[in-house]
Image (cartoon, grey):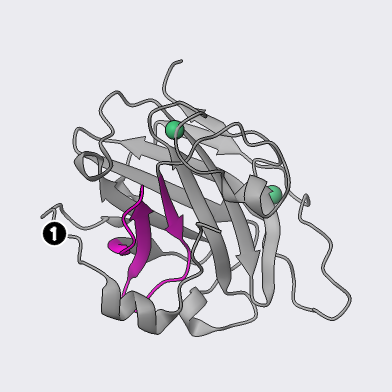
Amino acid sequence: MRRALPVLAVVLISCSSDSTGLPPLGGGGTNFQYSFADPVGDTLPPPANVFQRALDVASVRVGLTSDSIFVKFEFTSAISRWSERALNSIDGFVDFDFDNNSATGYPAATEEFGDVNADMGVESYFSLRDDGLGHMGRRDGDVLDWRMVPVEFQDRSFTIRFARADVAETDGKFRISAMIGGTDRLITDLVPGAGHHRVGAQ
Ligand SMILES: [Ca+2]
Ligand SMILES: [Ca+2]
């Protein structure tokens, strides 16, 4: 299996820091040009031995600037960082098909774990397991090390920001999907339920 499930210690040891010199996330000042609604209440039923509430994504927003990509996931209820190990801590992956070609790259997590057809070939993906210091890890192509990327948490959402140049994204067109999990649950919500969302006119 190509997809790694990082543990905190590995992330802290093997990562390289984001050194793009870009400004901080800046809270609500970001302009998200693309918004994709996700059905509320479409979470997978929990297994019998897990009692916590399923994490349910309500929308995904994507903002592009000349040098950065912002991605914001909004939930129907409060979330916690994975590193907090709370009952509502998030887990999972966000996948990007940056060359818009399902024949290049890896299968999406929704496909690999959720057994749906994502029609994506993933060049880069994020693990939602943060390092407790305001970063999540991104892996690009065949590079094994995790690149640490700033993440900002709000009560019901989180936002990641990374440089377009770092992922060779130039035309503003790419595919995105996510597999959202929770504490002791690898999957609670597939975003979207099958296929992918498309950023940019295509
Ligand atoms: Ca949902
Ligand atoms: Ca691809």
Residue 2 coordinates in the image, percent (x, y):
50, 57
Circle 1 — which element? Answer: loop
**Magenta region:** 124-149
Residue 25 vertical position relative to residue 59 in the rendered view, above or below: below
Residue 166 coordinates in the image, percent (x, y):
22, 45
Q: Quadrant of residue 199?
A: top left
Provide the residue designation for mark 1.
19
Pick the residue in front: 135 or 107: 107
Query: On the picture, is 23 further left or further right than 168?
Result: left
Residue 156 coordinates in the image, percent (x, y):
54, 62
> Which amino acid does the dot numbered 1 rest on?
Ser
Residue 177 coordinates in the image, percent (x, y):
55, 42
Residue extending farthest to the top is 202
Ligand 2 rendered quadrant: top left
Residue 139 vertical position relative to residue 49 in the rendered view, above or below: above
Asked if residue 136 lies in the magenta stretch, the reply is: yes
Rendered residue at 77%/49% (across/down): 42
Residue extending farthest to the left is 21
Rendered residue at 42%/39% (across/down): 62
Rendered residue at 10%/55% (across/down): 21
